[in-house]
């Protein structure tokens, strides 16, 4: 089975190694950028995002999107969230209706407040769109870490094919039918990671952080239901699994950003201190705030975080402010 992976970033490379581990698969990777393609083709790695991790020699790398997608059963969109619309529009010229489009980009598009799978559908009208998500850092997946994923979509035959192509003796993949809930969880966990990192930066004890985390989990469930997902999606690899990973590890750029805020840095100072400048949770905080107003629901923890970051509100007594009733 041919797998086309669009993008050569850290997560795209990690996924390429997983798909390529199944010897029944052939993998082709695409980037539209000549400089990026030259580096990756020559060095068989992308040193700017995943230094030291080699792309398997039998994986094709190309700048020809049509060639990359031609004959592929699965097309994986592994580009940054901000590029999903443009890439989806390019994909629409080459995609076949029987192809399965798998989205691994996470987030909500500013201005339209659309989730990634909705953008892909709007551009392609493909009915085999899936979301693949779970607790996974690119470097760990690339190095063969064992973990669990969910593949979500409305077509069970499509999710089954993705499961069989991706799952191996180290990775468990569970089919799920709530793509909306998975999208919400995958986006909001980055915002909550800022919150939890901030508590760490403030020097709060583990018991305090754990109590706050319980309230954040409840807030995630509220958001999933308010946006049309299923409450039980919280108890999935892509739900609570991914949230716990992102909210508890300094490997998360969102968590690290929050730590700096907790230590008293301004947002600008925190950005300037970090080597990686992309903090997805900041953008998601803005879009989910718009969605709360549009859909007429409230998430107290997000209101509090927004006030701290943009209005200079106090970080004191957060457990009292977001406590569960």
Image (tube, rainbow, N blue to C red):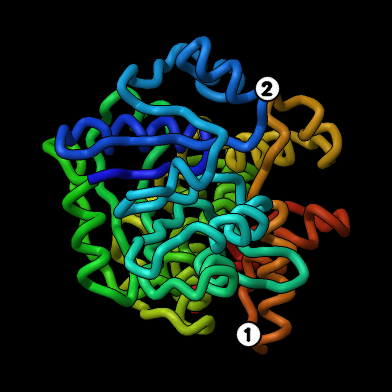
Dividing the picture into quarters, in which one does residue 191 lie? bottom right
Q: Alpha-carbon neighbours of circle 2 within 10 Å: few (<14), some, or many (≥20)?
A: few
Query: Tags 2 and 1 in contact by the CB under 8 Å rule?
Result: no
Dot 1 falls on a residue whose secondary structure is loop
Could you say where residue 18 lies in the image, as x and y percent from the top left?
A: 28, 35
* Quadrant housing residue 138: top left
Q: Is residue 114 above or below residue 189?
A: below
**Residue designated by label 1:** 297
Given this view, does label 2 or label 1 mark the residue nearer the observer?
2
Q: Foreground: 89 or 108?
A: 89
* Quarter location, residue 231: bottom left
**Image height check: is 149 above or below 93?**
above
Q: Which mark is residue 98?
A: none
Residue 131: image location, x then y, percent: 40, 61
Assess disc 1: are there few (<14), some (14-19) or many (≥20) residues with their C-alpha within 10 Å of its C-alpha: some
Image position of 36 (left or right of 19): right
Say whether residue 97 is left or right of residue 112.
left
The residue that appears at 73% across and 83% down in the rendered structure is 293
Q: Position of residue 137 (x, y in %)?
A: 42, 35
Furthest-left residue in this view: 169
First in residue order: circle 2 vs circle 1: 2
Quadrant (top left, top right, bottom left, bottom right) of the N terminus = top left
Residue drawn 30% across the image and 22% down it: 58
| Vertical comparison of 271 with 224: above or below | above
| Residue 35, numbered circle | 2
Q: Is residue 289 visible?
A: yes
Residue 230, image x and y in percent? 37, 80
Question: Which residue is found at the position 54% from the left and 38% from the top?
Answer: 64
Q: Nearer the viewer, residue 231 or 277?
A: 277
Is residue 191 in view? no
Please state if 284 lies on the left or on the right of 118 as rendered: right
């Amino acid at each position: 089975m041919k797998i086309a992976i669009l993008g050569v970033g850290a997560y795209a490379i990690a996924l390429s190694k997983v798909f390529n581990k199944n010897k029944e698969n052939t993998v082709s990777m695409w980037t539209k950028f000549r400089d990026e393609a030259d580096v990756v083709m020559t060095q068989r790695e992308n040193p700017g995002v995943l230094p030291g991790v080699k792309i398997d020699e039998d994986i094709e790398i190309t700048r020809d999107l049509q060639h990359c997608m031609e004959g592929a059963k699965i097309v994986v969109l592994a580009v940054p969230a901000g590029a999903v619309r443009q890439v989806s529009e390019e994909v629409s010229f080459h995609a076949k209706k029987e192809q399965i489009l798998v989205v691994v980009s996470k987030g909500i598009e500013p201005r339209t407040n659309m989730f990634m799978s909705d953008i892909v559908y709007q551009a392609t009208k493909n009915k085999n769109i899936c979301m693949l998500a779970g607790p996974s850092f690119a470097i760990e997946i690339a190095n063969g870490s064992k973990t669990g994923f969910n593949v979500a979509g409305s077509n069970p035959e499509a999710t089954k094919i993705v499961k069989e192509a991706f799952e191996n003796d180290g990775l468990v993949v569970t089919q799920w039918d709530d793509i909306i809930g998975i999208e919400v969880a995958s986006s909001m966990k980055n915002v909550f990671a800022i919150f939890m990192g901030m508590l760490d930066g403030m020097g709060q004890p583990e018991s305090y952080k754990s109590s706050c985390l319980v309230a954040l989990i409840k807030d995630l469930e509220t958001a999933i239901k308010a946006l049309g997902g299923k409450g039980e999606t919280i108890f999935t690899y892509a739900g609570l699994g991914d949230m716990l990973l992102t909210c508890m590890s300094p490997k998360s750029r969102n968590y690290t950003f929050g730590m700096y805020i907790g230590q008293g840095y301004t947002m600008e100072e925190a950005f300037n201190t970090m080597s990686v400048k992309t903090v997805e949770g900041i953008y998601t905080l803005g879009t989910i705030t718009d969605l709360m107003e549009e859909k007429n629901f409230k998430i107290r923890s997000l209101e509090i975080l927004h006030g701290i970051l943009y209005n200079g509100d106090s970080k004191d007594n957060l457990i009292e402010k977001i406590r569960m009733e």
